[in-house]
């Protein structure tokens, strides 16, 4: 059989070559994939004759070879054809081998039971699909049955709408919800069939099953939020207004707050009638909506200035039902009305061109591209890739910009390695001065579509290519890595940060790359995997810091329920700080809201001298790197400190590293 396959493949390739006039046309042969999802449908004639029709199918298959499972020889047919064979009563192992156009094959085996007894013990399961509206899933099992038919019960349709092998599933989409008299007919080799009947209610999904997409992390100054769990919302005077024409409810899905609007004509919102809200510096309007499938009403947003006068209304486009739709409009779209200005927007309306039965709303806000960034890339430029490729390059070629992608509002490096070779065959670098003899800390986020390795480090960008790099394992989970690297024996003004990724196949994504002077974590248990110690509350050595463990990851976590002085709630680790030295503090922080915390280094006793920074954290895990100066203080029992008591909300901290320049 193996030799037959080789001959078949060779003949196919020769035929393809003969039919091509240019050898370059053959490149597609290397990309032909193996056939997949191979199966066969068995259909037996119900006359006790044992005549079975076998119809194979499969993705990427051009021909099939059917092993009938009895004494008959195998039969080869073209995709789309069927074969017939007469069986006596018994059980047969039918093999289906699918070939692609170059002769590569995939084989599966299916059991065929032929009996001339009527099907018995018919068991049927019919249920509405949990995620697809008006879709019904059916399965059936029975003794002495080969296949079964599904009759949908729809008016004017008398024939079966689907057929499957007994034990296999059927999914069927109805046009409208309602109660239907469905029928399942189990068929075997006997003339007699067995039926199952049921009046089944087909349901329509009229509410979202999951929360809307989470908006990206943005600075508060860059967002004017009307309604979102991620940002700080404006204080609204009226929601809904007394003159609104809709039923308004606050709902919740997966801990995400949303608005439910039923019988929606329009929803009125009053920001405030004194000065309104200022949208003049915003660039985009964002809103997420969900409506059921089949909804045809068009939705609009209107903004009104009742102080200086004027209004404008803009469409959200043709309605798409059954899933969350994220709509973004340029704020300039609202220039078409008679607004005097966008500095005093006092009313906002969500409108419908008719009465929309139900609509769900989330993440309604206006924003501009960030004017500031909380990310510190240290010695690098554009370490978060938000500026595009430059100055990131392929290898050391200044004229070859690194490939980047933008997903949502996040831009990052991304390359799919399709053929493994030398690890340095695929590389991304940024040239930067590396001073020989110094220690550096390299921090970055990396993830893939599989489990694979990459090399990361620092080194020269020319012969002799001296470097210090480490091999790390990445996975589909976005992970922050921190490496301590030594420029021992090399250095140059045009050295580089490097990522060598060509050694294995798979996607490689890299983001938030930071390189700072200094290395070696001065802290103990910075990732909290050892529990609390030596992390403490405040400066009390006897009070262990609170930590939690979720999905094998342990980290500091504290929920601040009442705001006070920022230092009222604190976590610290005592460590020697040498006066006059520069330190680099790196950590990951996130919250259940948008709020600020202070982080830094300082004394653990009066006069409490310190150097710390206020940073903004959000529900998105973010890596921060701070450069701190112990210019006028130092002690053997000084500390790394996080002061978090100034605002309410949960604070989570992980992967804390302190290094000295």
Image (cartoon, grey):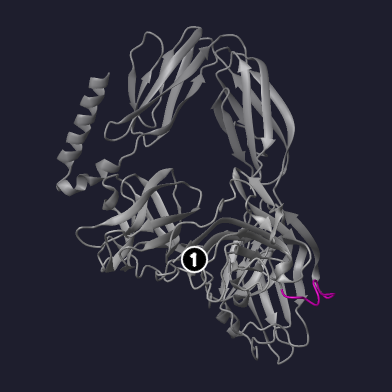
Count of numbered labels shown in the rendering? 1
First to last magenta residue range = 234-243
Residue 138 seen by the camera: yes
Task: Residue 234 in the image: state x and y as whole percent.
Answer: 72, 75
Q: Which of the 4 quarters of the picture holds residue 340?
A: bottom right
Q: Is residue 184 magenta?
A: no
Residue lying at the far front in this picture: please name it: 636
**Helix, strand or loop for disc 1:** strand
Relative to 423, residue 280 above or below: below
Q: Nearer the viewer, residue 308 or 115?
A: 308
Relative to 518, residue 534 above or below: above
Q: Quadrant of the C terminus?
A: bottom left
Q: Residues within 10 Å of mark 1 (few under 14, many from 20)?
A: many
Mark 1 = which residue?
584
Task: Residue 44 in the image: state x and y as whole percent.
Answer: 51, 18
Q: Nearer the viewer, residue 6 or 456?
A: 456
Residue 290 seen by the camera: no
Q: Is residue 88 left or right of residue 654?
A: left
Q: Nearer the viewer, residue 440 or 630?
A: 630
Q: Which of the 4 quarters of the picture holds residue 438?
A: bottom left
Task: Residue 578 in the image: state x and y as whole percent.
Answer: 51, 67
Q: Is residue 242 magenta?
A: yes
Main secondary structure of the magenta stretch: loop
Q: Is residue 476 left or right of residue 508?
A: right
Q: Residue at x 79, y 65 (%)?
A: 562
Q: Residue at x 40, y 15 (%)?
A: 68
Q: Nearer the viewer, residue 496 or 325?
A: 496
Q: Is residue 619 left or right of residue 240?
A: left
Task: Residue 584 in the image: state x and y as whole percent.
Answer: 49, 66
Q: Quadrant of the N terminus?
A: top left
């Amino acid at each position: 059989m193996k030799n037959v396959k080789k001959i078949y493949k060779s003949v196919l390739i020769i035929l393809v070559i003969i039919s091509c006039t240019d050898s370059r046309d053959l490149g597609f042969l290397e990309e032909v994939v193996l056939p997949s999802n191979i199966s066969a449908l068995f259909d037996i004639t119900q006359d006790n004759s044992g005549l079975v029709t076998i119809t194979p199918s499969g993705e990427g298959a051009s021909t099939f070879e059917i092993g009938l499972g009895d004494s008959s020889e195998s039969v080869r047919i073209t995709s789309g054809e069927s074969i017939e064979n007469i069986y006596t009563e018994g059980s047969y192992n039918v093999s289906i081998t699918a070939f692609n156009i170059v002769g590569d094959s995939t084989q599966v085996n299916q059991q065929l039971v032929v009996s001339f007894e009527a099907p018995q013990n018919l068991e049927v399961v019919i249920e509405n699909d949990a995620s697809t509206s008006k879709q019904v899933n059916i399965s059936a099992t029975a003794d002495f049955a080969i296949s079964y038919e599904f009759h949908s019960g729809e008016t004017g349709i008398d024939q079966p709408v689907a057929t499957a092998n007994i034990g296999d599933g059927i999914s069927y989409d109805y046009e409208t919800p309602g109660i239907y008299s469905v029928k399942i007919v189990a068929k075997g080799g006997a003339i007699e069939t067995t039926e199952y009947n049921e009046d089944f209610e087909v349901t329509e999904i009229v509410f979202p099953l999951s929360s809307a997409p989470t908006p990206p992390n943005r600075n508060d100054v860059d967002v004017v939020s009307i309604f979102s769990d991620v940002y700080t919302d404006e204080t609204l005077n009226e929601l809904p207004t007394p003159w609104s024409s809709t039923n308004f409810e606050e709902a919740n899905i997966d801990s995400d707050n949303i608005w439910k609007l039923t019988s929606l004509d329009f929803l009125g919102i009053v920001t405030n009638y004194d000065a309104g809200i200022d949208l003049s510096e915003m660039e985009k309007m964002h809103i997420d909506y969900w409506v059921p499938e089949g909804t045809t009403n068009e939705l609009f947003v209107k903004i009104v200035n009742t102080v200086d006068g004027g209004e404008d209304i803009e469409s959200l486009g043709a309605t798409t039902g059954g899933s969350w739709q994220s709509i973004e409009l340029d704020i300039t779209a609202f220039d078409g009305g008679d607004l005097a200005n966008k500095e005093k927007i006092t009313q906002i309306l969500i409108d419908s061109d008719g009465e929309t039965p139900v609509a769900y709303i989330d993440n309604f806000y206006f924003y501009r591209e960030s004017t500031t960034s909380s990310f510190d890339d240290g010695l690098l430029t554009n370490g978060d890739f938000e500026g595009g490729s430059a100055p990131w390059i392929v290898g050391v070629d200044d004229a070859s910009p690194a490939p980047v992608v933008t997903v949502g509002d996040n831009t990052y490096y991304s390359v799919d390695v399709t053929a493994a070779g030398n690890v340095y065959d695929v590389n991304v670098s940024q040239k930067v001065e590396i001073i020989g003899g110094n220690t550096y800390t390299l921090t970055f986020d990396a993830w893939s579509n599989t489990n694979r390795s990459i090399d990361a480090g620092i080194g020269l960008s020319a012969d002799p290519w001296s470097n210090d790099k480490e091999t790390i394992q990445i996975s589909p989970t976005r992970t922050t890595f921190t490496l301590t690297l030594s420029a021992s024996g090399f250095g140059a003004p045009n050295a580089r940060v490097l990522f060598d990724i060509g050694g294995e196949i798979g996607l490689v994504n890299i983001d938030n790359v930071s390189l700072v002077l200094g290395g070696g974590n001065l802290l103990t248990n910075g990732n909290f995997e050892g529990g609390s110690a030596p992390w403490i509350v405040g400066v009390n050595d006897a009070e262990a810091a609170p930590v939690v463990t979720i999905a094998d990851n342990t980290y500091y976590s504290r929920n601040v329920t009442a705001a006070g002085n920022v230092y009222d709630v604190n976590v610290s680790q005592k460590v020697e700080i040498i006066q006059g030295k520069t330190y680099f503090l790196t950590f990951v922080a996130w919250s259940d809201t948008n709020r600020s915390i202070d982080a830094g280094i300082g004394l653990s006793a009066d006069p409490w001298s310190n150097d710390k920074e206020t940073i903004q954290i959000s529900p998105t895990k973010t890596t921060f790197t701070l450069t701190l100066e112990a210019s006028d203080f130092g002690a053997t029992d000084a500390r790394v400190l996080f002061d978090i008591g100034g605002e309410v909300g949960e604070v989570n901290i992980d992967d804390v590293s302190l290094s000295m320049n």
